[in-house]
Amino acid sequence: MTAPEATAPEALDLPESNPFSRAWETPFKLPPFAEIAPEHIRPAFDAALAKHKAEIASIIAEPAKPDFANTIEAMEQAGRALSRVGGVFYNLTGAHTNEALQAIEREMSPITSRHWSAIMMDAGLFARVERVYERREALHLDAEQLRLLERSYKGFVRSGARLGPGDKTRLAAINERLAALGTQFSQNVLKDESSYALILDEEAKLAGLPPFLLAAMARAAADRGQEGKHAVTLSRSIIEPFLTFSTRRDLREEAFIAWSKRGEHAGKTDNRAIVAEMVALRAEKAKLLGFRTFAHFKLDDCMAKTPENVRELLELVWKPAKARAAEEAANLAALAQGEGENGPIRPWDWRHYAEKVRQQTYALDEAVLKPYLQLDRIIAAAFDTAGKLFGLAFEEMTDLAGYHPDVRIWEVKEARSGRHIGLFLGDYFARSSKRSGAWMSAFRGQRKLGGEVRPIIVNVCNFAKPEEGKPALLSLDDARTLFHEFGHALHGLLSDVTYGSLAGTSVSRDFVELPSQLYEHWFMTEEVMQRFCLHAETGEPIPQALIDKIRQAQTFNQGFATVEYTSSALVDLAFHSLEKPEGLDPLAFEAAELARLGMPAEITMRHRTPHFTHVFSGDGYSAGYYSYLWSEVMDADAFNAFIEAGDVFAPEVAGKLKRYIYSAGDTRDAAEAYTLFRGRLPTPDALLEKRGLAA
């Protein structure tokens, strides 16, 4: 028994028991998470792929000559069912996975790759796209239509549409293999992260740990069936404060090594061979498409344009950062020697002694600061900032259910008119079913073609979950992360374009971090901190003296932070600048590149190669991890526009920011968008000043 012929383009010809068989009548068409089970996913994928294939076939078979409506817009309309299935599935595999979902993910990654390769290399479809593209000047398209046409045409060319039959076959095989390897890489890292716990069962092993960390570790132990004990996990919200506060150097070393060696253990989760194969396949792919290296291929479609431009920026920052890190290391060694530790500072020592130096220099104690950073208050601060800048209002919808009990849901509206803007889901706490890190994603993107569709956006974080009945307390870095990811969320929520493939965060990789990194600046303003940073027990606002200390300490430890990040970006660029990577030993290559750079022995890369998911769990940030720094050049300069206006919420500046950056998606070139907002392109000066690295 199959569902009746559905009028909704996202509905599929499946048994009625499968939720993907029908249009969802839930509020805001939120996925009915409680009804969706792993056994529904594969049939839904199969049906959605078949439906999309048929939709594309009908475009190719269209007897009328190719035009913008029957080819470009028709492709935009196709695949709605596939987008809906994928939107649910891939969010679950990242934020709340299980063995059944992971098995489906392994099955589907090569199948979906094969599907897209077939579409993007189809000679008949590309001929139609090319015909429209060649006539673009005569079609009287508006600016967004012209942008969509140009991006569509370039997407086909970059996907191999111009290649001969043999090269198309080889490129499709490469893409399929890369998809399977990226999935395996990600699952291996998650397995290493979720399976590790350093159980501490003696009081002496807890030396130096503050109450907030002890509470988080106790909960983590209980979640692993170790009631009454404490667990160090590889979630940043636990491992980093443990490395900061524990006075047990032996335990710090043990935990750090486990953290550093994710994806590097011999056996089923070893990612080293995966990395070698991925780098080789990417290099081959680039050559097939006419590029010298994979870095040249990737960067050709970004603001940076060339590996040389990226390297120039990274090395501009690397040199002063390394010098600053050497000064910081000397200060840490002096402190350690004063405490009787005469050996060299090792990577598992840095955070511990840096915190002591920070307390001595700025009298800024993370344990004192943390009670002022309640999760609920920081969420409220992020929402209030969006209200002041962009006129948004947020209403929590406690009657709506997410994909996990921890997920909270808010309706986002225009404050003045009450117009619905979208749904925002917040999933903040670490758990073993969630990959590490923090990110923004979409269950549904915004579009207007075929009727207004508003987005459903999710932020996923990995903060330590508090004891029952206690408020969740964040670190300063956690609070910045929340604002950062909410900046991405706003980029999705405020999107106001016609075509879904240009919506929200569908911009060049080195521009996508601008809205998120810029949004972090507002958290550090007095206007936000004084109102929302209230003590968890007393309710008192954060003292001005403590805000002053935070500001004074903003450039503290920036040598370490910049070296840690920039080394990762330089190694990523080096891997993908290889012309002949056959026989590559990833760890030997990583070590050689770090030696060439003069990497300080006291610091490790923020993301070592075997667990560098940004770069190897998919193509997203491959040859592109530099983009955080590239965007930081813009975010430092962009916030100065508000400073120059004399008001961090200056309405005129905020209006331009919303119009040209947050709402515009990929409707224009990134450099043009930034220039329309700021009146010019930025220079690295503001970045160096922000990080305290200016000469």
Image (cartoon, rainbow, N blue to C red):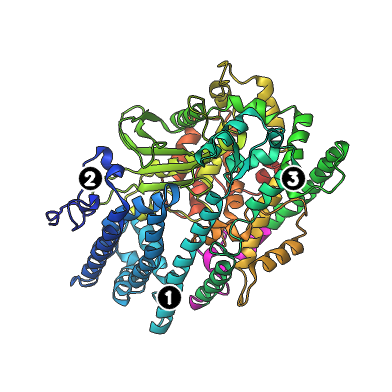
Residue type at tag 1: Ala
How far apart, in angstroms, are the residues tagged by discs 1 and 3?
A: 47 Å
Residue type at tag 3: Asp
Element type where label 1 sits in the image: helix
Discs 3/2, front: 3
x and y, in percent, of residue 212 in the image: 60, 29
Query: Which quadrant of the view contains residue 41?
Result: bottom left
Of 468 and 611, which appears nearest the observer?
468
Of 274 and 483, which appears nearest the observer?
274
Query: Which quadrant of the view contains residue 639?
Result: top right
For residue 309: magenta?
yes
Task: Look at mark 3 in the image and give the residue it sits on.
Answer: 250
The relative height of residue 492 versus residue 134 in the rendered view (above or below) is: above
x and y, in percent, of residue 47 in the image: 24, 62
Task: Look at mark 2 in the image and give the residue it sits on.
Answer: 24
Q: Which residues are magenta?
A: 288-313
The tag earlier along the polypeptide, 3 or 2, is: 2
Residue count near mark 1 (Cα–Cα under 10 Å), binned few <14, some 14–19, many ≥20: some
